[in-house]
Amino acid sequence: MPRHSAAVYRRRRLVTLVAAILVVAVVGVAVWLLVARPWANAAEATPSPSASASAPESSTPDPTAGESPAAESPAPESSAEETPGIVACEAGDVEVAAVTDADAYDPGVMPQLSISLTNRGSTDCAIDVGSTTQRLTVSSGSDVWWTSTDCQENPSSMVATLTAGATVTSKVPVTWDRTRSSVETCADENRPRAPGGGASYHVAVEIGGFKGTTTKQILLY
């Protein structure tokens, strides 16, 4: 009997090994099919014709279903009565007076001039107390030495309510530099100076269209 070569034996062993691998693979697939049962899952997922036919048709959803009802418009609240407007002050109710920080001034001391405003009436009233309506004048006899409006800058209006029975005074006084004023000499540093030595001057004031009934006397030294 002829003896086969080593190559023949190797081929036989290779064929046997491949056949064994195929057998193991087939057995493994068979076991997986028995355990996993994929056909059963597919059958459960597919509804039967009878079940589909017996299922009730879903009704068309109501487009308003689930929506909250529209909020009702709130009823308008009754408005409060308007506060009556404050009437303008009248001459018979307003008392205007000149106020100074001293009665006599030593040489070189500048008088500080203010306006006092009193409502003698029984009701509050409105008055324009802005610098546009203010005017302070310093005179010696009939000679007017100084007027606050001659060189006034940026005058303004300010309407305020003057409470009945109340007295108010200018918050910021006006300084008189003891010189003679004029609209032509506002930038002049050498304006004539008012004589001192005990000379008498009178301060007159006006505000909101109302003039002071009296003047305030001051003495310059």
Image: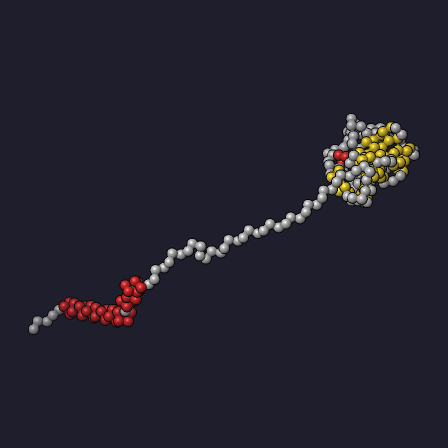
Residue that sits furthest to the left in the current view = 1
Residue that sits furthest to the right in the current view = 198
| Pick the front one: 24 or 61 | 61
| Pick the front one: 137 or 125 | 125
In the image: residue 74, left or right of residue 110:
left
On the image, the x and y values in percent for residue 145 come to: 85, 30
| Pick the front one: 60 or 48 | 60
- Name the residue at 44% across, 57% down: 65
Q: Is residue 178 above or below residue 162?
A: above
Q: Quadrant of the N terminus?
A: bottom left
- Name the residue at 54% across, 53% down: 72
- Name the residue at 74% across, 34% down: 155
Q: How many marks do you count on the picture?
A: 0
Q: Is residue 71 visible in this depiction of the protein?
A: yes
In the image: residue 144, left or right of residue 75:
right
On the image, the x and y values in percent for residue 207 come to: 79, 36
Q: Is residue 123 above or below residue 69?
A: above
Question: Looking at the rendering, which quadrant does residue 24 occupy?
Answer: bottom left
| Pick the front one: 124 or 35 | 124
In the image: residue 146, left or right of residue 17:
right
Question: Looking at the rendering, which quadrant does residue 56 occupy?
Answer: bottom left
In the image: residue 55, left or right of residue 117:
left
On the image, the x and y values in percent for residue 104 come to: 89, 38
Q: Is residue 186 above or below residue 55?
A: above
Residue that sits furthest to the bottom in the current view = 1
Question: Looking at the rendering, which quadrant does residue 101 occupy?
Answer: top right
Way the structure is coloured: secondary structure
Q: Quadrant of the C terminus?
A: top right
Q: Is residue 177 visible in this depiction of the protein?
A: no
Residue that sits furthest to the top in the current view = 184
On the image, the x and y values in percent for residue 148 come to: 80, 33
